[in-house]
Image (cartoon, helix red, strand yellow):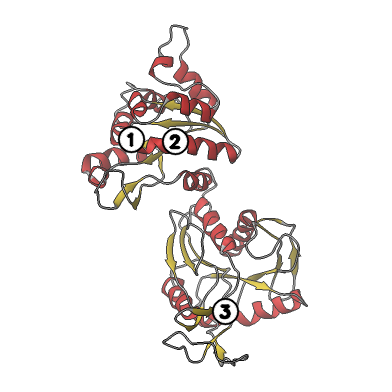
Amino acid sequence: MNLIVAASGGVAALKTPTLIRRLEEAGHKVRVAATEAAFHFITPLSLAVAAGSEVFDQASWFKADGQAKHIDLARWADALIVSPATADALASAAQARADDVISALCISGIPKIIWVPAMNTAMWQHPLVQKNVETLKTIGHAFLGPVSGNLAAKGEAAGIGRMLEPEEIVAALPSLFKSQDLSGKHVLVSAGPTREYLDPVRFISNPSSGKMGYAMAEAALARGAKVTLITGPSALTPPVSANTQKVETALDMLEALKGSFASCDILVMTAAVADWRAKHVATEKQPKMGEEQTLELIRTPDILSTLKPLRSKQIMVGFAMETDKGVERAADKASRKGLDFICLNYPTQEGTSFGGDDNQITVVKPNGDSEKLARMSKRAIADIILDKALALKQS
């Protein structure tokens, strides 16, 4: 896409060059604009170097060259991203003042305008600021953030108003351009591993990174769904707009899923849930004892089998990891657990191991019918899974 990144006058403008670079790394063409106030925090040179082109600012806007530069730039762009967006920038745009480059661009015909607010909590929550936000939303402008976190002012308590990080903005961007075919639907996703503790510092787990589940959540959000993400321990940053609940054990995950299952339309169970847990969990760290030690294990709850009797309208999708007789075993699992289909993958297959960005799945139905997909990114697979689940939902 052709994107204009515009910085207004807030300290978060320090992040604008990084945002430009991350957008370019994602394959977008980027040009940059900035208000005069932005130059209190960032230099024109740093923005120009990041974008590889001249900054559209007050000085270049009024060059005596006969060009309407804001109109020319607007015709080139698919979207304008105002990052950071200050209270002043929002007010100028809401009132169509066109007295700076950002508010002028906002009324110059750019198809999509996206605001990434950054300001003090009191300012963001002020009724006049919120009135301007609602005015802009009413005419189709989109907002990413703000989020809760540490604010710029020294000694200021953490609160809502912090700008999204550049990487989060890039990740959230596709959701603003996707077909909203899941609007009004609630998608429930489980992700990551679980941990079954032996004592306070040791546990049984697996190498699941959570990438498949987080990709599912991102894909569903991009298509307009309300998303609840139940995640085991993961180093990944959850999608900003998801209702994320962090859990550790299989029992924790079951309880969290039960809490949202009744209201969901689609359940996608990607989590790698531990099959076994310690029969007795020690309350103190256990010392080493000899060369061998025997653990007494019992089964963890079977989450899908527990949810099956509670099912009403939900489409249920599972994942199966096998190394032998995959389709046969996956079909049996789908049948026993009441799944509409199950996604079979092989952890020993090249390029599809735990923690990777790609996967290759075979979609297996309870009757044994199967469809093997090509190796692709987990994000692309997520959209295929949602396509199939939505088709079943609408049938």
* Secondary element at image label 1: loop
How crowded pointer 2 is (Cα within 10 Å; few <14, some 14-19, many 20+) is rated as many
Indicate whether 237 appears above or below 117: below
Assign a secondary structure to mark 2.
Answer: helix
User: Callout 3 environment at 10 Å: few (<14), some (14 to 19), or many (20+)?
Assistant: some
At x 57%, y 64%, the residue is 209
Q: Inspect the image, locate mark 3, and give the three-letter code of the amino acid beneath it.
A: Ala
Q: Which mark is residue 274?
A: 3
| Residue 250 visible in the current orientation | yes
In the rendered image, which residue does mark 2 sit on?
16
Q: Position of residue 218 (x, y in %)?
A: 52, 55
Q: Position of residue 134 (x, y in %)?
A: 31, 41
Residue identified by numbered label 1:
10
Nearer to the camera, 78 or 205: 205
Instruction: Classify mark 3: helix, strand or loop.
Output: loop
Q: Position of residue 69 (x, y in %)?
A: 47, 17
Depicted 25 relative to depicted 226: above or below: above
